[in-house]
Amino acid sequence: MAEFFITGTDTGVGKSIVSAGLLRAAALRGLRSTGVKPLAAGAEYRHGAWVNDDALLLQSASSAPLAYADTNPVLLHAAMAPHLAAEEEGMALEAAALARHCRGVARLGHELLLVEGAGGWLVPINARESLADVAGLLGWPVILVVGMRLGCLNHALLSAAAIRAQGLRLAGWVANSASPSMPALAANIATLEARIGAPRLGTVPWMGSEVGLDAVAAQLDLDPLLVPAHA
């Protein structure tokens, strides 16, 4: 069984599509894959229920999907920083409760479990805690999604350093093209490969608004995630 926490260099860098691509890649191998979005900010009312697009994507990409309430136990309505949205809704967020839910899912049995955060690594969830504290309580290896755009080198290397400062292993990273073109894309990827200290799991090219999960899965390599860290 392999369990990972997925974070990004910022919001809007493609965490959900990469997470869904990894889940789909596992499903295509015949593995039981499950995705969880313990905390989401930004809700839409559909078919009589409030839902979040990212959580729905993870649910649809999982070969062993959970009920929506288990995929996304905490849904905040406003698309803003979680601690601000929670304060606006009179809700108290706690890292321990979010981590406890993820551990409960882990006990259900799977071969790949991905827990996707919200925004970047240090996004606050209350006055003293951030999503990094959720990952720290879980203790699972981390996958970093890097939105390939100007400024990504600094954001990626700072995020990698912060992940390790939390005492966690950076299991791998994914270069996700955040725009149709980026100057010196290959050189930027090479710079990260030389400095980030973790395997690149793939490069997802710009695919526009209509992104197919099979196409994303084809760009990703699961092997470094499925081999034990000590092997």
Image (spheres, helix red, strand yellow):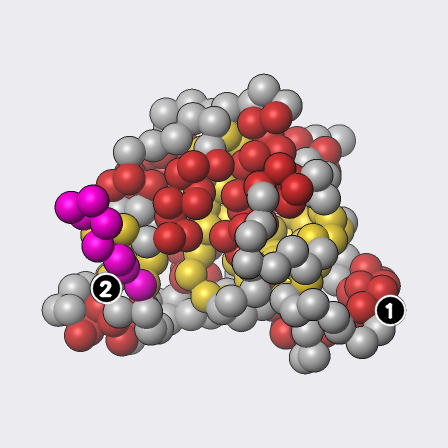
Task: Tell me the amino acid under the disc marked 2.
Answer: His
Residue 199 in view of the camera: yes
Direction from residue 214 to residue 116 in the image, left or right: left
The percent coordinates of residue 32 (x first, y second) are 50, 24
Quadrant in which residue 107 is drawn: top left
Classify the position of the N terminus by image quarter: top right
- Determine whether the residue tagged by mark 2 lies in a helix, strand or loop: loop
How far apart, in angstroms, are the residues tagged by discs 2 and 1?
Answer: 40 Å
Residue 1 in view of the camera: no
- Residue 43 vs 183, above or below: the answer is above
Q: Which residue is mark 1?
A: 187
Task: Tell me the amino acid under the disc marked 1.
Answer: Ala
Q: Please tell me which residue is depicted at 19% across the width and 73% down the height of the picture.
A: 87
Classify the position of the C terminus by image quarter: top right
The percent coordinates of residue 143 (x first, y second) are 60, 51
Q: Crowding near pointer 1: few (<14 within 10 Å), some, many (20+)?
A: few
Residue 217 disc label: none
- Residue 135 vs 184, above or below: the answer is above
- Residue 25 vs 56, above or below: the answer is above
**Circle nearer the N terminus (2, 1):** 2
Extreme-left residue of the structure: 90
Residues tagged 2 and 1 counted as in contact (Cβ below 8 A) = no
Q: Which residue is mark 2?
A: 77
Which residue is nearer to you in this view: 136 or 219?
A: 219
**Magenta segment: does it hold 47?**
yes
Q: Which residues are magenta?
A: 42-49
- Determine whether the residue tagged by mark 1 lies in a helix, strand or loop: helix
